[in-house]
């Protein structure tokens, strides 16, 4: 996960962003958007739960008119976004404003680094929470990219031959398992961050 070299890079990046005033610490205006980000976190988590429930329930899918519905990919994505917004609320709650949307770094990378810099490096968060957030971010990005590539390949391949049932079921089982893990990780992460917000 994070070694001393990674921590040094994060420290340098965040300090540079603060010098450039792309990250601002504003104690007077702290908490202004905390509830906004908390609400987005809750909505994202609720979406993940609903998608998981529908994806796992054949009768519900049929009653909704979508017998082949599969929302596992979006369970993973929504779970990650619930964590992302929870981190945004945590940063906002202490007055850390992120003004950066640099072409060099994505907002997701900056938020992760800010979490590490302001909460992990000073021992306000335990390592497991940082690792969970980083893993969720990586999985969400990887799976979305793989899913897009897979769909393009499948569209091309489907004209040549149909995928075998075994391969399809194996892929679905793996995606379902990842979705379940993502949902559980987001639930734990969000509960722990809320404890900090209540202090």
Image (cartoon, rainbow, N blue to C red):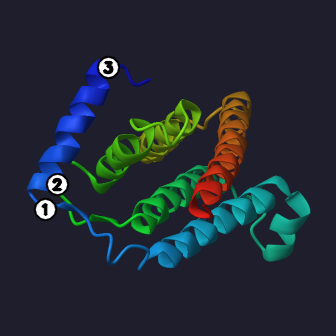
Residue at the spot x=86%, y=58% of the render?
A: 57
Indicate which disc, 3 or 1, sits on the residue closer to the N terminus.
3
Indicate which disc, 2 or 3, sits on the residue closer to the N terminus.
3
Q: Which residue is mark 3?
A: 4
Q: Quadrant of the N terminus?
A: top left
Residue at the spot x=43%, y=62% of the render?
A: 88
Name the spot of residue 35 as percent of width and height, x first.
Answer: 53, 77
Residue at the spot x=82%, y=53% of the render?
A: 56
Q: Which residue is mark 2?
A: 18
Give the side of residue 52 with respect to residue 195, left or right. Answer: right
Residue at the spot x=26%, y=20% of the render?
A: 5
Question: Mark 1 falls on what kind of element?
Answer: loop
Of 159 and 107, nearer the camera is 107
Label 1, label 2: how many angstroms apart (C-alpha)?
Answer: 5 Å
Q: Are marks 1 and 2 in contact (CB under 8 Å)?
A: yes
Q: Are marks 2 and 3 in contact (CB under 8 Å)?
A: no
Question: Mark 2 falls on what kind of element?
Answer: helix
Question: Mark 3 falls on what kind of element?
Answer: helix
The reply to whether residue 103 is visible in this rendering is no
> Dot 3, crowdedness within 10 Å: few (<14), some or many (≥20)?
few
Q: Which residue is mark 1?
A: 21
Label 2, label 3: how many angstroms apart (C-alpha)?
Answer: 21 Å
Q: Quadrant of the C terminus?
A: bottom right
Name the spot of residue 139 as percent of width and height, x first.
Answer: 50, 39
Name the spot of residue 95 as percent of width and height, x first.
Answer: 36, 67
Label 3, label 1: how many angstroms apart (C-alpha)?
Answer: 25 Å
Name the spot of residue 179 as percent of width and height, x first.
Answer: 67, 45
């Amino acid at each position: 996960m994070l070694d001393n070299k990674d921590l040094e890079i994060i420290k340098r990046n965040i300090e540079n962003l603060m010098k450039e005033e792309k990250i601002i610490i504003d104690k007077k205006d702290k908490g202004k958007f905390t509830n906004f980000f908390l609400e987005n976190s809750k909505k994202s988590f609720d979406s993940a739960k609903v998608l998981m429930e529908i994806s796992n329930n054949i009768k519900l899918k049929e009653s909704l008119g979508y017998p082949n519905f599969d929302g596992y990919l979006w369970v993973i994505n929504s779970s990650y976004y619930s964590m992302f917004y929870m981190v945004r609320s945590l940063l906002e709650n202490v007055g850390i404003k992120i003004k950066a949307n640099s072409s060099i770094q994505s907002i997701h990378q900056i938020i992760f680094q800010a979490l590490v810099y302001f909460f992990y490096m000073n021992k306000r968060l335990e390592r497991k929470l940082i690792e969970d957030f980083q893993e969720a971010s990586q999985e969400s990005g990887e799976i979305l990219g793989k899913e897009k590539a897979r769909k393009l390949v499948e569209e091309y391949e489907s004209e040549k031959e149909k995928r075998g049932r075994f391969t399809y079921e194996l892929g679905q089982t793996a995606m379902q398992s990842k979705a379940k893990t993502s949902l559980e990780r987001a639930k734990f992460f969000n509960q722990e961050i809320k404890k900090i917000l209540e202090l």
